[in-house]
Amino acid sequence: MSKHVYSFAEGDGQNKKLLGGKGANLCEMTQIGINVPPGFVITTEACLEYLDGDGLPDSLMDEVREEIEQLEKATGKTFGKGPDPLLVSVRSGSALSMPGMMDTVLNLGLNEDTLAGLIEQTGDERFAYDAYRRFIQLFGKVALGIDDVYFDEHFDAVKQQAGVKADVSLEAEHLKEISELFLDVVRQQAGRDFPSDVIEQLQLAVEAVFRSWMGKRAVDYRREFNITPDLANGTAVNICTMVFGNKGNDCATGVGFTRNPGTGENEMFGEYLTNAQGEDVVAGIRTPKPIVDLGDEMPEQYKQLVELRNTLETHYKEVQDYEFTIEKGTLYCLQTRNGKMNAAATVKTSVEMFGEKLLTRNEALLRVPPELLEQLLHPTLDPNNDARVVAQGLPASPGAASGKCVFDADLAEKLGNAGEQIILVREETRPEDIHGFFAAQGILTSRGGKTSHAAVVARGMGKPCVAGAEGIVVDVAARLARVGERTIHEGDVITLDGGTGEVYLGAIPTIPAHFSDELAELLGWADETANLKVMANADTPDAAKRASEYGAMGIGLCRTERMFNATDRLPIVIDMILANSEEDRKAALDRLLPIQRDDFVKVFTVMAPNPVTVRLLDPPMHEFLPTEHDLLEQIENLEVYRKIVRGRQAAIATLDHAVDLPEALQELSGEHVNDALAHKERMLRKVRELEEVNPMLGHRGVRIGITYPEIYEMQIQAILEAAMQCAENGVDVRPEIMVPQVITLQEITHVRRAADEIVARLEEESGKKVAFKFGTMIETVRACTRAWHLAGVAEFFSFGTNDLTQATFSFSREDAENKFLPMYNEMGVLQDNPFEVLDLKGVGKLIKMAVQGGREQREDLKIGICGEQGGHPDSIQFCHDVGLNYVSCSGPRVPVARLAAAQANLRSQVTN
Ligand code: PEP
Ligand code: MG
């Protein structure tokens, strides 16, 4: 016969699965000498047996009776009878905390006899009836399923009759009347008398608490927070002697944190009420006092409370959130659990608890959830705002910002440069909107997912972005957006929270990010602990600078196409694309070369002496051109304007004197319009020529590099010349040239050969050596299967898991995220979004294969990851486990990744 019940003095404080978190802690506290009221725990196993079959396990109530006898002995009180009756609380508690999700009954053990005993023993009729009416209602609700409204209507009626507003003003006689009315409610609603047999009360309460494990609230909570049966299965029931904080002015009840959970400060923190029950503190009926006031009010008990707090922290080596009651001058601890804190407090306490030798450095590192750090790295909305959410999108890039809505990038740039705070609002963004990103405080799109262009670029820049807010209909032509009945005009101020995806009307104050000394210290430890290096994906000197402030140890991915998009370059890039001969293309490239070189010099200098991996041009060329639709519209407008110009000329000719046209109109001459039209028509022809059915699977990456070799040659030359220039300036640079979209050895051999020729030429011209590494992205399935061969030429691999995930799943990222992925996640067809969390079973398997192949060929092959998943803690654990050398992620994710990399190493040491 298995044991289902453990007294607090015997239960194993480490066995939260069996005894629940609360029960285990009550046992532990009892056993280390903290003053816990005597009690016992019924196990989660008993709960599962009850839920499985038809009734409580056979011997359970016998065990309970025995424990009750022990309680009677320990307290000198008697259960269900006598002048000093024993009352107990019956509380739920599973292995993981599920606050408020399951049921609790207090004051159990009251009936007509014990009520009389309680009155006699305390001499306080009011107190006794108050306890009784609370018990009847709570028991009625929890064990007999009677809705609160039936009780509340009587309670309110008596209060009204008595002419009192606050519960505490009710007299004993009122509470007595209420108790009697409540007993009637039970009779009517449950069709039975309120049980006066206290063992029956106990049995019904235990069964009800067991059932509450499967209650809707609890089931929904477990689903929401992914609490699976291996984490928590069934609830335990804690039966504990009641102690009362409401027996007079030498009584009190309160809750405390062993440190300040808002700041992490090592100080007494909490609230209490004198002459009150625990639920009064939580319910907010009376305003509790700060815990330090207890020092004046009950100095002796306060001293004991400080001791209690010190004992809890020294024992648990973790900030505790505890509940206490003082009954007639005696302090009891009723509960303790690990305290939930915000990010700043978690970091500060980690660093300080290491300093106080409460934690080892590794424990201090493991204690901080990496994702929590996001809170510290971006501005957040002032929580004291009362603004209303007008639209909800995806939290695509964290941070908060307010500004005037602007519906196109040109105007955003103009206003932004004039010093205005701007939010760029678009249906979706394209590379040619990039100047609008630079000018804006935040980006809002009505379409697209978390890996849409807007999301990826905003994250790279560390700007907040809400993507795919589908409730918003953007009408650029009318310069407005509609959200339901509401219209947002250009210039109206809105606020974005990129961490939640919420959009608000009006400006909400933000709290700036704060990279505290403690965070810097913790991350310093992380860097010493991790095996993986953490690089950043950064494309501009500014982004590189920010990334290195976040602690990036180099740049793992510099997407050169982003450099092409700035307003001063795009026209040259377009000339290059429009070129119909190699000669014309080279002429455009000659103009681009110095611009790229200057960019590289700046980025290398910021990052020196860390490596910078520059990826050669990747996207299909049409991405740099306007869409066919836009061009057709522009051409149509220009044609209309040409007619107007002709009409004006004809009209002027009818005059008998000359007229001076304003300067602007002179500039917009027929000739100018003709040229503009010819240029647009050329673009249109090119756009049509470049059109592909599946551009992302088409003419992009190294395929462009091979068909138009002069483009890659220009880029390689710019990289190498920049490296030479840096070396001349005394800057220690480590450039790495990376080829995208590779599928065969021949492709990289081809590019390598071109690079070697350029190096030879440059070295000969300058008489100086230039060092660089040459490698490839691994982002096609074929590259994974041919890794051994590719590593013959490539000195490093970088897994482009954005494309590799698309290729492995045969998903187009944008379509998947916009159409079916959310539903797949909801239905559990796919657990996670594979574009955020690396798919270990599929993509992970390919990565492992490629790592193995690559290192078989080249033992010291440097391998990293630069897809979006590279900043996700679970993916980082995998990257550590398969032996990658680095992860690369957007700048603001770098601190998260540094901590995750350290934890990955510590966890794998434990596993091994
Ligand atoms: C990738 O494919 O993972 C990658 C980093 O490249 P991009 O996102 O630019 O295609
Ligand atoms: Mg890619």
Image (cartoon, grey):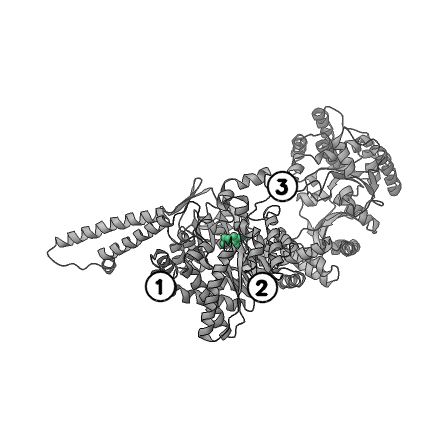
| Residue 366 placement, left or right of 863 | right
Indicate left or right for 869 with 187 as reference.
left
In this view of the protein, which residue sits in the foreground, 406 or 181? 406
* Alpha carbons under labels 1 and 3: distance apart: 59 Å
Q: Earlier in the sequence, mark 1 or mark 3?
A: 3
Report x, y in % for residue 2: 84, 36
Decide if ligand 1 comes within 8 Å of the CB at mark 2. no
Q: Which mark is residue 224?
A: 3
- The amino acid type found where label 2 is placed reads Met
**Ligand 1 closer than 8 Å to label 1 CB:** no
**In this figure, which residue is indicated by the disc labeled 1?**
587
Quarter of the picture containing the N terminus is top right
Picture coordinates of residue 830, whole percent (x, y): 59, 41
Please tell me whether mark 1 sits on a helix, a strand or a loop.
Answer: helix
Q: Residues within 10 Å of mark 2 (few under 14, many from 20)?
A: many
Residue 96 point in image, percent of width and height: 71, 44
Q: Which label was assigned to residue 553?
A: 2
